[in-house]
Image: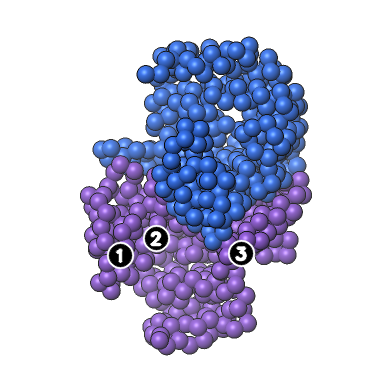
Chain colours: A purple, B blue
Amino acid sequence: MTATETLSLAEIETLAFDALVKAGTSEENARPLAVATAMTEADGVASHGLAYIPIYAQHVECGKVDGQAKPVVDQPRPAVVTVDAATGFAHSAIDLGFEKLIPLAKEMGVAVLAVNNSYNCGVLGVHTQRLAQAGLMGIGFTNAPASIAPSGGAKPVVGTNPFSISAPDAEGNAALLIDQSASTIAKSEVMKHAREGQPVPEGWVLDANGQPTTDPEAGLKGSMVPSGGYKGVGIALTVELMAAAMTGATLGSVASPFSGTAGGPPKTGQFFIAIDPEATSGGLFQEKLAALVASFRDQDGARLPGDGRQTARVRAATDGVAVNAALLEKVRALL
Amino acid sequence: MTATETLSLAEIETLAFDALVKAGTSEENARPLAVATAMTEADGVASHGLAYIPIYAQHVECGKVDGQAKPVVDQPRPAVVTVDAATGFAHSAIDLGFEKLIPLAKEMGVAVLAVNNSYNCGVLGVHTQRLAQAGLMGIGFTNAPASIAPSGGAKPVVGTNPFSISAPDAEGNAALLIDQSASTIAKSEVMKHAREGQPVPEGWVLDANGQPTTDPEAGLKGSMVPSGGYKGVGIALTVELMAAAMTGATLGSVASPFSGTAGGPPKTGQFFIAIDPEATSGGLFQEKLAALVASFRDQDGARLPGDGRQTARVRAATDGVAVNAALLEKVRALL
């Protein structure tokens, strides 16, 4: 059994904030990332919560991300917000953008936010969820260094590129949350198997010649299997179009890796679309959404995307989160 | 060998137009559908071209679609266009909406179009492609009667719901076009196997208990397999949110079937997002898009989504399209 220590969400946020500031991050940049870290732990996505704080701290120190960056916000058209993240953290850039995006989407009915010169934004659904909490349909895209090859090819050209959509209920919550990458399995799972010297199941990765393999090392030198074959490539390409081409960010095929200290800032991008459902549906949105959610929930055993995270979130708000003790020691050592 | 007759695109459009008008469709409603039919044949998607004209004619005659409908356009917010298709054809509703959407997206940087009380819109990519031809990034969603069950459930709640994205090149063409449904295979393929009494490969359909089957009839009474498992359900649900909940249209779980004459108008919906890439990318879009397209094309054998349709389109413009002679006879019999 793994030793754990239970922390409140406030304690998680403070710990993340202090560690980031100690590493050289400005308070303005550390706060949004610390908030997102606590939200991610609350949602039960431990792989992307406190576990990333030592990596973030290292990346500030080696210059892969500029902890002191001052993101630059612009509004080149009435319904378009852009943010140059200036090779800083994605989170503060997105936060600054959302400050303009949310009221604009309500006024115009729809608005978009394009972020470039950015970095790994952590769990994408944490951001779209905030748009839902503001009463908007939130759609998000973020690109990553290439690890998926085209159908018929073997060389990766697009990342495992997730998209996310979050729908608002009438009480200021996310009624449902979809947040899924374009690959069969997360790349972090393959890296974990490689670290532990374990083979991966067939269907996760391909070798550098595009052939199936169960060797995680060969897979990391090759490519990730797209979910649903060519349709997964279609999703990854959709996300690359939105998060990189539409923002002017660096394509996954030439971006530096998110992991390790080499290569300088990845300068990847994020794109968000925020839409006021009441405006587009003639006031019918909540009724339709409730019926759609019910059609899933009314079936025994049927899973509605986002329910797992929501259950974890409700529990975490009162009970806190059990954090791996070894990880906690590693994070506290940064202070 | 199947007997065919080669028709020019103009001949296909005229034939479709005349058959639709003869069935009781107004000229205003018949023209956009006839144009889309010719575009669909040009793109080589024969399953959704002239083959649908006898079905459309029958649906006008039985009242599943109102051939004389007058779609109503509104602009409830500065960047939102809505169209009530009034149980008429989707195509004329979308056309009317695009007339407002396209200039609005250029002015605002982004605009959306929500269509409700609508009908099957044929090949979704035909519509997003027109946004790309207008210099905009075009994203489209359309919902359909339910045929995909939730993960862990067996009763269908969402349709095979496609999404499409089309990116503009600098010369007024679609540089690439993604248009894919949420199921492993198109439902029409299962119906074709059922008609021919042939078993379907495993992985296409599930029976009414959610169990794998190779019997197409059992599959049509059960559900379609989502592409990539729960991630395919996530895509279908994303599309349902956008095309139905966001438009106030009928959910797939309660919509009348697109096929056959029973059940009255399906009243499903479409949703389009049009974005000016120059506004969001600071003028970098074409450079990034070209590099992304090249990363696919530079690999021997790699397929870029949309290339097949584009090749067919270029050929059809000069050589026309070889149409199945038996189908042609059936369509001409409508005149």
The answer for which chain carries disc 3 is A
Upstream in the sequence, badge 1 or badge 2?
2
Q: Is residue A68 visible?
A: yes
Q: Which residue is at 39% across, 60% downward? A: A185
The amino acid marked with disc number 1 is Val
Query: Seen in the image, is B146 located left or right of residue B302?
Result: right
Upstream in the sequence, badge 3 or badge 1?
1
Could you classify mark 3 by the number of other residues whose Cα lies within 10 Å: few (under 14), some (14-19), or many (20 or more)?
few
Q: Residue furthest front?
A: B197
Name which quarter of the figure residue B220 lies in: top right
Q: Is residue B317 above or below residue B138?
A: above
The residue where tag 1 is placed is A200
**Residue A50, percent across and down?**
45, 76
**Residue B184, percent across and down?**
46, 45
Nearer the observer, A236 or B135: A236
The residue where tag 3 is placed is A300
The residue where tag 2 is placed is A185
Name which quarter of the figure residue B50 lies in: top right
Q: Are marks 1 and 2 in contact (CB under 8 Å)?
A: yes
Measure how far apart labels 1 and 2 are at the Cα level: 11 Å
Q: Is residue B103 visible?
A: no
